[in-house]
Image (cartoon, rainbow, N blue to C red):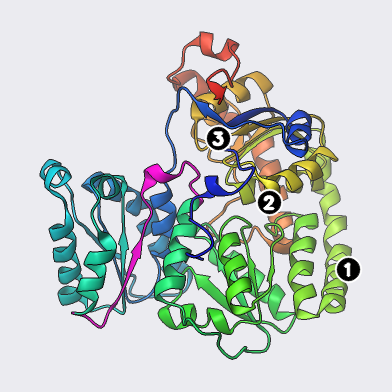
Amino acid sequence: MARTYSGIRESRPYTYNDLGGKSLRLADDFNKKCLKNADRTFSQGLQCRQINSISCVLSLEDSVFIIHSPQGCSGCVTMGADGYRVGQAHRGVTLIKSPRVIVTNLDRDDVIMGGEKKLADAIKLARERYNPKMIFIFTSCASGIIGDDVDAITAEQQKLTDSILVPIHCDGFRSKICASGFDAAFIAIQKYLLPQEPQPKVKGLVNLFAPTSISYKDQLEVERMLGLLDAQVNYIPFYSSLEKIRRITSAEVSTSICKVFADEFMKELDETYGIPFAHTVMPIGVRNTDKWLLGIADLLGKRKLAEEYIEKEHRRILPQLEGIKKRLAGKKVFICGGTGRSFAAAALIDDFEMELVGLETPTYDFDAQMDIEYLNGIHQDYVVDIANMQPFEQVNLVNRLKPDLFIGVPSWSARLGVPTTHVLDPKRATMGYDGILYLGNKIADQVENPGFNRKLAPHSRLPYKESWYRQDAFKFIKED
């Protein structure tokens, strides 16, 4: 991967992260290559790519994680650490552990004089205190700006330890597309952890790449569905190990639960190790679950087996959807989420005959265009906001569109009094066919019981003037 891809998603052609407008016009302009690069003259918060690099590997067994940054950059670890502990409990672990994290705590003197000694000392501390199999080193905006030679320090320290040192170059300022952090982690995994020569293939072995937002119940469900195709699943890198990572190159095929999580890495595995991959959609909703399963079945030569299973599940599930449709048909929805999950949710609500009025997602590219074109065929002309965070645009749009339901992280829209929910659930299966029933009933329950949010709104003040709600939500997006 390091030879063919920089790890910066803006380097890919026709990729946009500052964009807004109606879906039909955006899709038409994209096809005509008329969309122009733009930037926000005002920005309210971005998700940093370092967060995604850390979350990608934080649950790997027998590892230490060094964050070469000021102390504040390690704040994101608290969320990942909490998810790691919860995930262990769901997996039946009795003695729950926290991730072993060391922060170099760069300060003003280091910004002037350099922080390389602190990094070397941190590696030494990790080696002496824990003696792990792997030591991951994450760069930061600060270490990148001052020019610390992380690779040179790592190479020198590697001579002193049997632990594998893995520097991950995830300086946040290099990309506004947070998914670039996943790419940075996989670039390092390929360079430092994978065997460089092709390995003997294991019949039926499937690399299943999954981000941290996938619950254990979802893991079991997607593994069960692949098991119906006689596949062995190498579930990586979440709750994985060095041994499982090294099995990656022995797989017959690869797939990912989230289409943006490991797409670049799967391309590299195909080119370098001859491992074909299925790059489809997140298996949420009837259409997406069908498509996801058939994508991997075609590569394994098991399409007939998959079609038989899908037909059986449709006979079981579709009649049960009728009751949910009666509760939700015609309700208006605004969706916000990562690229994979937001588009999956937009397809899901069609199962319940709901109406999409707005969609917020971080990136617009060729993959997003395929999803937008599909959604344009089933929903009326809806608003699209391509934004990494930017809550000021979200509250403007939600206030203007007045949806019956908001799907996504609820903290902003809930204070507008809008019923909110999420298709992400860390405790229950949301994927596969049973997941459709769970999500449908969950959404319907929230729509029918909006009292909490409506009572919250009069007592929770958002930090925006009333005049903002009367302005164009995209006024700060300026084309280059």
Tell me the residue that label 2 is attached to: 439
Q: Residue at x 62, y 88 (%)?
A: 201
Q: Name the kind of residue labelled 3 in the image.
A: Ala
Q: Name the kind of residue labelled 1 in the image.
A: Glu
Farthest front residue?
3
* Residue 164 covered by magenta stretch: yes
Which of the 4 image quarters holds residue 459?
A: top left
Q: Nearer the viewer, residue 22 or 356?
A: 22
* Residue 423 covered by magenta stretch: no
Report if residue 40 is visible in the image: yes
Q: Residue at x 21, y 75 (%)?
A: 130
- For the image, the number of numbered tags is 3
> Crowding near pointer 3: few (<14 within 10 Å), some, many (20+)?
many
Tell me the residue that label 3 is attached to: 387
- Vertical position of residue 281 compared to residue 10: above or below: below
Q: CA distance from mark 3 to mark 2?
A: 25 Å
The kind of secondary structure element at disc 2 is helix
Whole-percent x, y for residue 217 in the image = 58, 66
Q: Name the kind of residue labelled 2 in the image.
A: Leu
Whole-percent x, y for residue 54 in the image = 38, 58
**Which of the two discs, 1 and 2, labels the residue nearer the N terminus?**
1
Q: Say the numbered circle drawn on residue 311.
A: 1
Q: Residue at x 49, y 50 (%)?
A: 8
Q: Is residue 44 left or right of residue 402?
A: left
The kind of secondary structure element at disc 3 is loop
Q: Nearer the viewer, residue 240 or 410?
A: 240
Q: CA distance from mark 1 to mark 3?
A: 38 Å
Whole-percent x, y for residue 409 in the image = 53, 40
**Which of the two discs, 3 and 2, labels the residue nearer the N terminus?**
3
Q: Nearer the viewer, residue 322 or 212?
A: 212
Span shown in magenta: 160-179
Farthest top residue?
467
